[in-house]
Amino acid sequence: MKKCFTLLAMLGATAAQAHVTLDQATAYAGTYQKLAFRVGHGCDGKATTGLTVTLPEGASHAKPMPKAGWKISVTDSGALREISWKGGSLPDAYFDEFVVQVKLSPEPGKLYFRVVQECGKVSVAWDEIAGEKMKAPAPVLELLPAPAGTPHHAH
């Protein structure tokens, strides 16, 4: 019984450490999708002051949603596609979402988004992709085959 409890405690601790996550786990391949990157808390008690999302291959045509009090910058230099929100302040005691619309690859599979959370002079890179005891897992979106007749355009 004790081993089972320890395993559950470890699994719970791992889930609790996922601090920047996507609001959904799956989406249909080949569609436009709204993605909300959820920031659960700051860095060691400090307020979040910036968030940068690097889009993987398979996520293109990005349009960030404006956020009151934050400045948005988009870098699209071929291989590097980043969206940054900076200049705001999200206190550690609160959570919020940073939203972007993207066109998803027509190929099913997993997309990993590298996210850097800034808290003043401290930053945390949420970019780990594989492993059991990840301290900073990258948000992941699984692309599923789209059913016949699924619209591909955002309305």
Image (cartoon, rainbow, N blue to C red):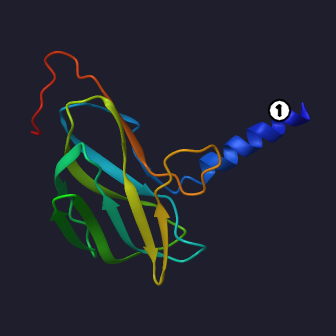
Q: Quadrant of the C terminus?
A: top left
Measured from the top left, where is residue 129 in percent x and y? Answer: 49, 47
Left or right: residue 44 versus residue 67 is right
Left or right: residue 96 versus residue 62 is right
Measured from the top left, where is residue 134 in percent x and y? Answer: 60, 51
Q: Residue furthest front?
A: 79
For this rendering, which residue is in front, 90 or 109?
109
In the image, residue 75 sits, relative to residue 129, either above or below, namely below
In the image, residue 133 sits, relative to residue 87, either above or below, namely above
To which residue does mark 1 refer? 4
* Displayed quadrant of residue 78: bottom left
The residue at 34%/66% (across/down) is: 52
Q: Residue furthest right?
A: 2
The residue at 55%/52% (across/down) is: 18
The residue at 12%/27% (across/down) is: 151
Q: Residue furthest bottom?
A: 121
Count how many numbered circles sit on residues in the image: 1
Q: Residue furthest top?
A: 148
The residue at 50%/59% (across/down) is: 40
Q: What residue type is disc 1 on?
A: Cys
Measured from the top left, where is residue 73 in percent x and y? Answer: 21, 71
Left or right: residue 75 versus residue 93 is left
Measured from the top left, where is residue 23 in percent x and y? Answer: 40, 45
* Displayed quadrant of residue 142: top left
Q: Quadrant of the N terminus?
A: top right
User: For the residue labelled by badge 1, is the local secondary structure a helix, a strand or a loop?
Assistant: helix
Left or right: residue 121 versus residue 56 is right
Q: Residues within 10 Å of mark 1 (few under 14, many from 20)?
A: few
